[in-house]
Amino acid sequence: MTGLMVSMLAFVAGVKDKMESEKGATAVEYGLMVALIAVAIIGGVSLLGDNLLAMFEGIAAEIVAP
């Protein structure tokens, strides 16, 4: 029973040490998140840009000449 307890304490100490050494996200992870968000925004604007432009041009044409 004592050997099992020593093994468990060693395991818990190892896990605790591992958790303390990794303290949150790094700058690289934040950079990747920003890059993915930028790609999503560029993709959305590319897909919807022409439709939005046509819609606003149609609204502008109706406002100027009813």
Image (cartoon, helix red, strand yellow):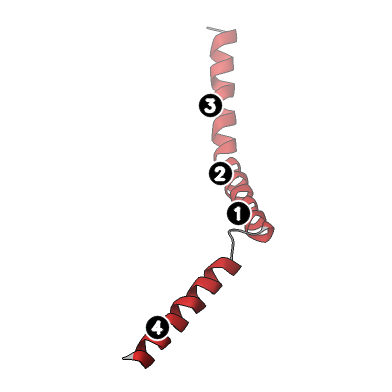
Q: Quarter-wise, where is residue 12 in the image?
A: bottom left
Q: Earlier in the sequence, mark 3 or mark 4?
A: 4
- Label 2, label 3: how many angstroms apart (C-alpha)? 16 Å
Which one is in front in this view, the residue at disc 1 or the one at disc 2?
A: 1
User: Is residue 12 or residue 50 the one in the foreground?
Assistant: 12
Relative side of 27 to 60, left or right: right
| Residue under label 4 | 8
Label 3's element? helix
Which residue is pictured at 60% across the width and 69% down the height? Answer: 21
Return the residue at label 1: 33
Rendered image: mark on residue 55? 3
Point out residue 6 in the picture as x, y percentages from the top left corner. 42, 87
| SS for dot 4 | helix
Dot 1: element: helix
Type of residue at label 4? Answer: Met
**Rendered residue at 39%/83% (across/down):** 8
Looking at the rendered structure, the secondary structure element under dot 2 is helix
Q: CA distance from mark 1 to mark 2?
A: 17 Å
Up-down relation of residue 43 to residue 59 (above or below): below
Residue closest to the far left: 1
Q: Which is in the foreground here, disc 1 or disc 3? A: 1
Would you call the spot at circle 1 few (<14 residues within 10 Å), some (14-19), or many (20 or more)?
Answer: few
The amino acid type of the residue labelled 1 equals Met
Sequence-wise, which precedes: disc 2 or disc 3? 2
For the residue carrying disc 2, how many other residues have a C-alpha within 10 Å: few (<14), some (14-19), or many (20+)?
few
Label pair 3/4, CB-CB below 8 angstroms: no
Which residue was labeled with disc 2?
A: 44
- Above-or-below relation of 12 to 64: below
Q: Amino acid at mark 2?
A: Gly
Instruction: Tell which circle, 1 or 3, labels the residue nearer the N-terminal end.
Output: 1
